[in-house]
């Protein structure tokens, strides 16, 4: 174990290039900095080559500097995660499905631009990984498309995400034969989503698997690209479609009664949401597209309250 003051002295010395400047930066005497470096070298061997015009790191010294930088960064991240004094600063960590993530991430970045003390850590992941990420405390918040049964989690509706039949612009779909003509652009959830939606639009259809497949992509942001180029149709959540940059190249076909997935916000049940998590959720709820969703939960104030408390207060 390296004493923190030794690590700080070595890092300052490597950055400043001299014992005198390092001591000045740290507010220590040169003798104190020299003593710290001597302790490190007694434990790890020569770390510096001392020259008349400055110092040069040995290979061991380079490794030591990398370690010291990692410790400094870990300390910084810990302070961000534990500091809850200001709601509009610190780290926000969330893990979501890619479809809603495409809508959320730009909003989060805009929020970070307005409040530079915020640090956004956002991962796209399938439901299972979202669940694991929140359960294992890697992320404070998560969004899933089902009601979790694990007692360690609290969940509440966050937003509705209807499925949509998306085709190239200028195409009309009236019959199953129109889908056969266009061909299917698949994605990891494509068959399941298309089966659910098209069963309502075309009852008794021969099955999505019987349609010609014209492509596949596992990147949520790219699924609509072949559709926009006229290569086929797909079924995708609305939030993913709304985030697509080339809206004029695609169109949504009305399918009657909507097929809706309700996204549920989850966090660990044992402790309340941090003040900044509650504050960020409020900011998201105040603007489109999430302020228009009937499933959305309103989060008021910046007090740390659990979602279960929010639900009880609404009922």
Image (spheres, rainbow, N blue to C red):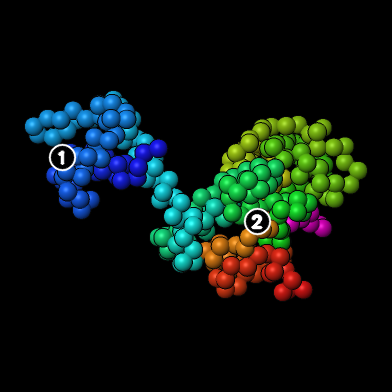
Residue displayed at 44% across by 55% down: 79
Question: Tag on residue 267?
Answer: 2
Question: Tag on residue 198?
Answer: none
Residue displayed at 58% across by 47% down: 138
- Where is residue 21? Give x, y as percent: 15, 46
- Where is residue 18? Give x, y as percent: 15, 40
- Label 2 crowd (10 A; few <14 / some 14-19 / many >=20): many
Q: Is residue 19 magenta?
A: no
Specify the quadrant of the image occupied by residue 140.
bottom right
- As helix, strand or loop, the secondary structure at mark 1 comes to loop
The answer to whether 303 appears left or right of 257 in the picture is: left
Tally of numbered tags: 2
Query: Residues in magenta?
Result: 254-262
Question: Tag on residue 18?
Answer: 1
Residue displayed at 15% across by 30% down: 50
- As helix, strand or loop, the secondary structure at mark 2 comes to strand
Give the answer, above or below, for where 110 lies relative to 145: below
Residue displayed at 25% across by 26% down: 46
């Amino acid at each position: 174990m390296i004493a923190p003051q030794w690590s700080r002295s070595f890092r300052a010395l490597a950055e400043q290039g001299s014992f005198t400047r390092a001591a000045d930066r740290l507010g220590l005497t040169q003798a104190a900095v020299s003593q710290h470096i001597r302790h490190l070298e007694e434990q790890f061997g020569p770390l510096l080559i001392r020259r008349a015009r400055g110092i040069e790191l040995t290979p061991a010294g380079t490794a030591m500097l990398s370690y010291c930088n990692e410790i400094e960064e870990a300390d910084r991240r810990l302070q961000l995660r534990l500091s809850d004094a200001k709601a509009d600063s610190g780290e926000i960590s969330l893990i979501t499905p890619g479809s809603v993530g495409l809508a959320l991430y730009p909003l989060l970045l805009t929020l970070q631009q307005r409040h530079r003390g915020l640090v956004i850590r956002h991962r796209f992941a399938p439901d299972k990984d979202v669940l694991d990420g929140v359960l294992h405390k890697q992320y404070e918040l998560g969004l899933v498309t089902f009601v979790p049964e694990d007692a360690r989690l609290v969940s509440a509706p966050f937003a509705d995400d209807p499925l949509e039949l998306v085709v190239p612009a200028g195409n009309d779909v009236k019959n199953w034969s129109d889908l056969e003509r266009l061909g299917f652009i698949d994605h990891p959830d494509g068959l399941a989503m298309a089966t659910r939606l098209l069963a309502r639009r075309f009852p008794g259809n021969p099955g999505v698997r019987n349609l010609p497949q014209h492509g596949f992509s596992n990147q949520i942001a790219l699924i609509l690209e072949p559709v926009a180029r006229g290569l086929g149709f797909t079924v995708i959540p609305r939030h993913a479609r709304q985030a697509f940059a080339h809206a004029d190249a695609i169109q949504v076909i009305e399918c009657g009664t909507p097929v809706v997935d309700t996204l549920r916000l989850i966090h660990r049940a044992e402790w309340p949401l941090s003040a900044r998590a509650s504050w960020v959720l409020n900011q998201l709820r105040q603007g489109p597209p999430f302020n228009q969703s009937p499933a959305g939960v309103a989060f008021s104030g910046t007090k740390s309250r659990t979602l279960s408390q929010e639900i009880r207060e609404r009922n």
